Amino acid sequence: MGKLTYLVHQSLDGYIEGPNGEFDWPAMGPELSAYSQQLTPEGTVFLYGRKVWELMAGFWPNAEQYSQDPHDLAFAPVWRQAPKVVVSRTLTSADFNTRIISEDPAQQITALKDAGTDLVLFGGSDLAAHLTEHRVIDEYHVVIHPLLLGTGRPAFPAAPQRTALELTGTRSFDGRTTLLRHQLVTDADTH
């Protein structure tokens, strides 16, 4: 059985984007970069909602032209090679080894997990909320950056029900960011 990990970068006050959609604030130091690489061994499927997919597809294929940051240079070839899934009702095609799921994302992603596929969902609060509601996400890896955005898109939008999680670890990276790692509490865990 595979698993789905949700990796999200958020401000201390809980936002993944600034008020104008800005995502220029996360700092990827060497320790955080190495951690993100550990989460994505070969064969891991990268999962995106359409908005995040468009950001990634606009940068990673040619990252070396835009950046000389060590994280970007190390991750760009990993991104290009990795199998990817984008959940979208509007996209009709996607390059870069990408499959589109347009209907029943919770069911289709569960089928991938049942087939032994490990996936990492990068950002995408709407997709994360949908998959949380359907109990498809197994682990939540929340990286908190030392910044108050004041307003913007919340990392965890309002949900129709509670979701019980168990803290499985914490870690500091580069003397700057903090990871909170949680796993989904299953029905079996509560009995």
Image: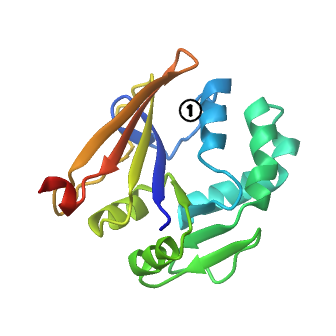
Above or below residue 156? Residue 28 is: above
Neighbor class of circle 1 (other Cα within 10 Å; few <14, some 14-19, many 20+) is some
The residue at the point 53 percent across, 76 percent down is: 115
Q: How is the image coloured?
A: rainbow
Left or right for 74, reference 131: right
28 or 186, nearer to the observer: 186
Above or below residue 167? Residue 128 is: below
Task: Report the label total.
Answer: 1
> On the image, numbered disc 1 is attached to which residue?
26
115 or 70, nearer to the observer: 115
x, y percent for residue 48: 55, 62
Left or right for 176, reference 104: right
Quadrant for the C terminus in the image: bottom left
Furthest toward the left, the residue is 191
The residue at the point 72 percent across, 61 percent down is: 82
Q: Quick one: SS at disc 1?
A: loop
Quadrant in which residue 19 is drawn: top left
x, y percent for residue 178: 45, 26
Above or below residue 109? Residue 174 is: above
x, y percent for residue 161: 16, 61
Residue type, label 1: Pro
Left or right for 146, reference 71: left
x, y percent for residue 125: 41, 55
Furthest toward the right, the residue is 65
The residue at the point 59 percent across, 46 percent down is: 39
22 or 186, nearer to the observer: 186
The residue at the point 47 percent across, 53 percent down is: 5
Left or right for 105, reference 77: left
